[in-house]
Image: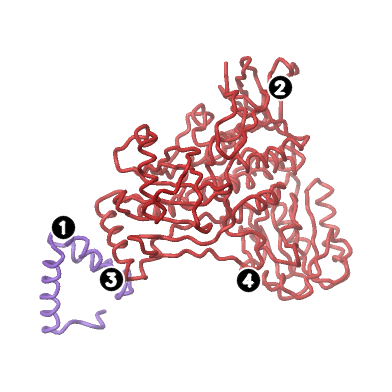
Chain colours: A purple, B red
Amino acid sequence: MSQNTLTIPGLEQVYDALATAIDGAGPEKTELFLVKLALMNAQALGDPEQFQRHLAAALRDL
Amino acid sequence: MHQPHAEPRRSIYYDYQVFDAWLPSQHPQPQHHAVVIAGAGPIGLVAALELARHGVKCVLLESERQVSEGSRAIVFTRRSMEILQQVGVADRVTQNGLPWRFGNSVYRGQRVFRMEAPHDPDDRFFPMINLQQQYLEEYLIDAVRANPLIELRWGNRVNAVTQDGQGATLEVDTPEGPYTLQADWLVAADGARSGIRSMLDLKLEGASYEGRFVIADIRIDLPLPTERLAFFDPDWNPGNTILMHREPHGIWRVDYQLPPGEDAEAALKPESLKARIDAQLAMIGHAGVPWEMDWCSVYSARALTLPDYVHGRVLFTGDAAHLLPIFGVRGANTGFQDAQALAWRLAFVVQGLAAAPLLAGYSSERVGAAREIIDEAGKSTRFMTPPTRGFRLLRDAVLSLSLSEPFVGPLYHWRTSRPHEYRHSPANSAGDDNALFKAGPGHGAPPQNVRLGADDHLLDHLDHRFSLLYFTEGAAVPDALQAEVNGLRARGLPLRMIAVGSAQPVAGADETLADADGHLRERYGVLASGAAYLLRPDQHVCARWMSLDATRLRAALLNAAGLKMEA
């Protein structure tokens, strides 16, 4: 199912970059920023069903 | 006692004419009519003209004594123009309207999406044309007044309706008091606040949205082309949307969304209108340009339909049948298609050609169309007026992304009104060759227009009858086919045969189109002599064959027309 997965250093890089970007956006704009990001990632994913699975996974254990 | 306004309405560009009210004391004879239409708005007028094309008389009741207040419906689609062509007013709309095909969505001063409506070289009409509703009504009224089959009664308001299996009884109020009117069939074309819908206690189904818009018509000289403009989340009206359309006579329509909670009365105060319109003009770089108000109103976005348009002897059409959001020019443009789908069937029933169940096809086709529109319009409305925090967040994210990421642009485009394809209509023939065609309009679709020559298009050649397009290179229609056509006509079925593909007139056809370059055959996916398309009186395709024979023609016509005869 997953054609490309992150390497551990890659995942760590994303982790730091996303945290830094959230801080950069600030509390007022965090949601807006994250929704924009989700839309861009969905576009890159090109697969609404897979996106739906991501939604379900992310909604778990909130 | 009904007292409609006797003074002409005020307008800075339109001269209202007040017509004499129709008074019962001057018409003492009993009032029993085959068809009564309530409401002489664009849809009631088109329904009356369509019925008259079939030779059916009607009485058209209009509560007011003049045409609509304000410009109201201003954008008419190509399909509406094709329908208006049939009732004889398309030329006047073309002469006086402003055609267009581009829409622009603007956010933070940047054009983030440009809509280009396709314009096929085979089409006669532009995708859209702007004209104020008063003019359209005027042209339709002129056509109605010239038609001896239509009796238009100004100042007649329907106060009460009762019905039994045979017809409807109306109490109609006039400036000198009420009278009673019997109708075998009553067409309710009495608009969004349909009194007849209330009298029958019928409920609309669907959604009402919170978003409310001010609609204002101003006269102003702006150096802008006729294109739709939509502005999202401007500084002067954060989170909300503004639409602008050019109209004839130097008028611009400005629609702006109201902040939640603001009531209509406050929104329509002159100082409120002025501040907001000035702010909008400043935003587009035309601060201080003088303007004058013509008309304004408040509109709320609703997407509702009756679940059935046929209630015994009462038939609903246009806004009386459904309330659709203005985004995508859905109101009048949907209503014309209703009127067209209803009129031929009602004519067949009134004339005794078909039994009343034929009207069920009207309801199923048009309720289906309304539900499709409601579904699509819901998407537009959720973008324009987000109903929840989640939808607002997504909309704001799309606005923000659109400045640099064009992939979200199409989300700005609300789908505009289009002719509906009645793919699952009971009028479609079960035994034809629909599935074998690789091109051309399929089951239930409206016809693709085809340019035949200078100022000459296929749809110009269609009339109120069923049209059989018979593709042949032969000299004559085959005997068996000709005999079938003659037999059906002898039973009263209105059917016209147009032969396509022969340089010489084809014997037995009412008309022959040479189609010398084969372009019509190509667009209709016709590969060989003997193919045919059957178009209903409202022009939608109900059957097509690679090779037509008399038996299958008969079956298709009996089915589509609901003819009362042994098959």
Percent from the top left, x then y, of residue B273? 39, 39
Q: Amino acid at mark 3?
A: Met
Q: Kindly identify which numbered label has been placed on residue A28.
A: 1
Disc 1 + disc 4, Cβ < 8 Å: no
Compute the Cα span from label 1 to label 3: 20 Å
Left or right, B224 with respect to B354, comes to left
Q: Amino acid at mark 1?
A: Glu
Nearest to viewer (mark 4 / mark 3)? 3
Q: Secondary structure at mark 2?
A: loop
Q: Quadrant of the N terminus of chain B?
A: top right
Residue at 83% across, 71% down? B502
Read off the chain for label 4. B
Give the camera-side residue of A15 and B532. A15
| Quarter holding residue B109 | bottom left
Pointer 3: what residue? A40
Q: Residues within 10 Å of mark 2 (few under 14, many from 20)?
A: few
Same subunit, labels 4 and 3: the answer reads no
Q: Amino acid at mark 2?
A: Gln
Nearest to viewer (mark 2 / mark 3)? 3
